[in-house]
Amino acid sequence: MKILICSDGMPAADNATRVGGLIARACGADTTLLGIAERPADEQPLRQALEAQSELLRADGVTPSILVGAGEPISEMVEQTSANIYDLVVIGSRTTSRSGLHWRTAKTYEVIKVIPAPVLVAIGDCTQLKRFLVCTGGKAFIDAAVQLTGKVAAAIGATVTLLHVMAEPPAIYADLVQLEEDLDRLLESGSELGQNLVRQQKQLEAMGVTAEVRVRHGMVVDQVFAEAREGNHDLIVTGSSQARGTLRHYIMGDLTRTVLNRSECPVLVARSGLLPAGNFWTRLKNIFQTGQI
């Protein structure tokens, strides 16, 4: 496994270093600590800060390589992650304010949208990773996220909860609500949702990970954080999809953006592949049937 930890040399990056170190030690990962100096005068102080942060990693039994680049940070990160294949990129994140829709800095969102590797945003004072919460729509395109989560969970000894949230449907779908409230019936129903949740759970269990499935109804983000609180989860996993076309670009949906804004624990944004095929009317019908795009 290869991990890239990105640092601007500021105290907020220390948390990214700690979280990256927890995973790197458990996975025996080849780890690189990357800093980017925007001005020549920043290079020496940045190098000193990276050396100090590398000591945090060495204290966790991880010996990182140190890279110091120069230029615009996001462009340099794109270049580094395009020239080298990383299984995971870890970044820190500061807040801009506690009002409005966009609490994290714009750079956080931009990094997630443009680099090809999964991104772990180190939020809060994380000292352990033991309980992972995966936001799954019950669709196959989240499988890559499940696989990555399972790999990390197996190495670090964490449990995984697969959470599916369905918005409250109209009364005519009362039977569907009743079915989903009975988790055992749902998993045995043979429905697409039931089959995918069972398959994802079995994938995790085959990797040696203890996994459970949870189904909730209501506003998706509210239910995600209710589950995170009640289950004492210390990592939330959500997805992003690759945009159509030739440009390498990832779509970060409202759910992922809102989770990043409100979360008090690390958030892993895992790549979910291309958007499912189908015309507008097919996707619209799917939304009404499943509550998922």
Image (cartoon, grey):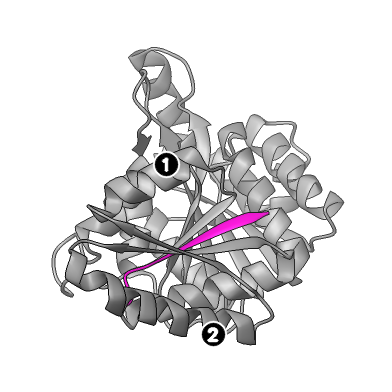
Residue occupying the point 37% across, 81% down? 48
Residue occupying the point 68% across, 54% down? 1
Q: Position of residue 101 (x, y in %)?
A: 18, 60
The residues colored magenta run 1-9
Q: Is residue 116 left or right of residue 35?
A: right
Q: Position of residue 259 (x, y in %)?
A: 37, 61
Q: Relative to 72, does residue 113 appear above or below in the rendering?
A: above
Foreground pick, 82 / 240: 82
Foreground pick, 63 / 213: 63
The image quarter in which residue 16 lies: bottom left
Q: Amino acid at mark 2?
A: Glu
Label 1 to label 2, Cα distance in Å? Answer: 52 Å
The reply to whether callout 1 and callout 2 are in contact (CB within 8 Å) is: no
The image quarter in which residue 38 lies: bottom left
Q: Amino acid at mark 1?
A: Pro
Q: Is residue 155 left or right of residue 268?
A: right
Is residue 138 found inside the magenta-colored segment of the image? no
Which disc number belongs to residue 55? 2
Q: Relative to 97, does residue 249 appear above or below in the rendering?
A: above
Mark 1 / mark 2, whichever is N-terminal: 2
Residue occupying the point 53% across, 74% down? 19
Which disc number belongs to residue 169? 1
Foreground pick, 86 / 123: 86
Q: Relative to 272, does residue 246 appear above or below in the rendering?
A: above
Crowd class of label 2 (few under 14; some 14 to 19; many from 20; radius 10 Å): some
Instruction: Select label 1 or label 2 by which is in front.
Output: 2
For label 2, the SS is helix
Residue occupying the point 41% across, 30% down? 288
